[in-house]
Image (cartoon, grey):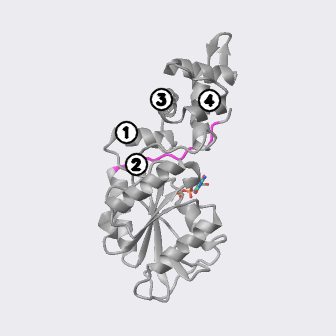
Amino acid sequence: MTEEKIEYIQWYPGHMAKANREIKEKLKLIDVVIEVVDARLPLSSKNPEINQYTWNKQHILLLNKADLADPDVSQDWIDWFKKNTDIQEIMLYDAFDRRHKTELVKQIQRLNVKNKAQLKCMICGIPNVGKSTVINSLIGKKKTQVGNKPGVTKGQQWLSTPDKLMLLDTPGILWPKFEDPLVGLHLAWLGSIKDTIYEKENIAADLLKYLVAYYPDELEVLYKITLDDKNLPEVFDAIAKSRGLLLRAGEYDYTRTSVLLLNDFKNGRIGRITLERP
Ligand code: GDP
């Protein structure tokens, strides 16, 4: 089994201060901030301080990778954000779905309250939530139209989209909430935080615990196991056994089973799963 490429988040105070400065500078020119979070963990993948930057902007929130998230919980999240934030537009989003992109453009244009000829937009979010994918979908093709526009601060690259939007070609990179240990765990489930092999087994065990509690049917179907009243180590064994992940006769390979579980989850093979609920 080959382990897939994992993007690591490693933030230090220096990174955060630099990102802060960059975003503030770029935002001077921006009409619409399009914030991207992961629909499977909409709060954990949200920057805790983004409101500082968006209070005087139009603000759209994309719950991206909605194709991988539990549709019922996603709807609960939409309702929660509507009730608890003053974000103008909140959308379930799949960055690979053309219809979603069309709807996004419509919503952006609806927010053009000052009737500007071209709205300036910026995509923001923590690493790995799909910012580049959203940028590419809005452009509709590879970034070939890059060019500096006169009158715009030097160094900013603007892309004009087929829908007459001006898009900053680099996303605004924000950091996640570190203070909450549960957020760290959630981001580790997604492979967004660096881990060692030993930690991988713990991370997989925590994930399995959550899946047994919330998504037992999906586990049974994918791994062809029955959960009955098995405890957690027994479920781990059952998955290893079902997939033939043995170290030697009678001894299961927990490292490979952990990697299998984490990868199956990340790739949506277990099903559409959301890791936190409002
Ligand atoms: P960035 O670091 O925020 O720019 O994230 P990327 O755009 O590089 O995306 C990270 C990973 O998520 C890539 O493997 C993308 O293919 C994947 N991805 C992005 N958006 C979606 C989506 O809506 N659905 C699914 N299933 N995968 C997505």
Q: Which amino acid does label 1 sit on?
A: Leu
Within 10 Å of disc 4 (Cα), the crowding (few <14, some 14-19, many 20+) is some
- Which callout, 1 or 3, points at the residue further toward the start of the chain? 1
- Which callout, 2 or 1, points at the residue further toward the start of the chain? 2
Mark 2 → mark 4, Cα distance in angstroms: 28 Å
Q: Quick one: quadrant of the N terminus?
A: top right
Mark 4 → mark 3, Cα distance in angstroms: 14 Å
- Which callout, 2 or 3, points at the residue further toward the start of the chain? 2
Q: What residue type is labelled 4?
A: Glu
Give the residue at mark 3. 209
Q: Is residue 132 above or below residue 179?
A: below
Q: Kindly identify which numbered label has been placed on residue 182.
A: 1
- Which callout, 2 or 4, points at the residue further toward the start of the chain? 2
Give the residue at mark 4. 220
Q: What residue type is labelled 2?
A: Ser
Q: Is mark 1 within 8 Å of ligand 1?
A: no
Q: What element carries label 4?
A: helix
Within 10 Å of disc 2 (Cα), the crowding (few <14, some 14-19, many 20+) is many
Within 10 Å of disc 3 (Cα), the crowding (few <14, some 14-19, many 20+) is some
Report if residue 245 is visible in the image.
no
Residue 18 percent location from the top left of the image? 36, 61
For residue 58, side relative to residue 4 (left or right): left
Number of on-image labels: 4
For residue 114, side relative to residue 253 (left or right): left
Q: Does the residue labelled 4 lie within 8 Å of ligand 1?
A: no
Q: Kindly identify which numbered label has been placed on residue 44.
A: 2
Magenta range is 3-12
Mark 1 → mark 3, Cα distance in angstroms: 14 Å
Residue 37 percent location from the top left of the image? 46, 56
Mark 1 → mark 4, Cα distance in angstroms: 26 Å
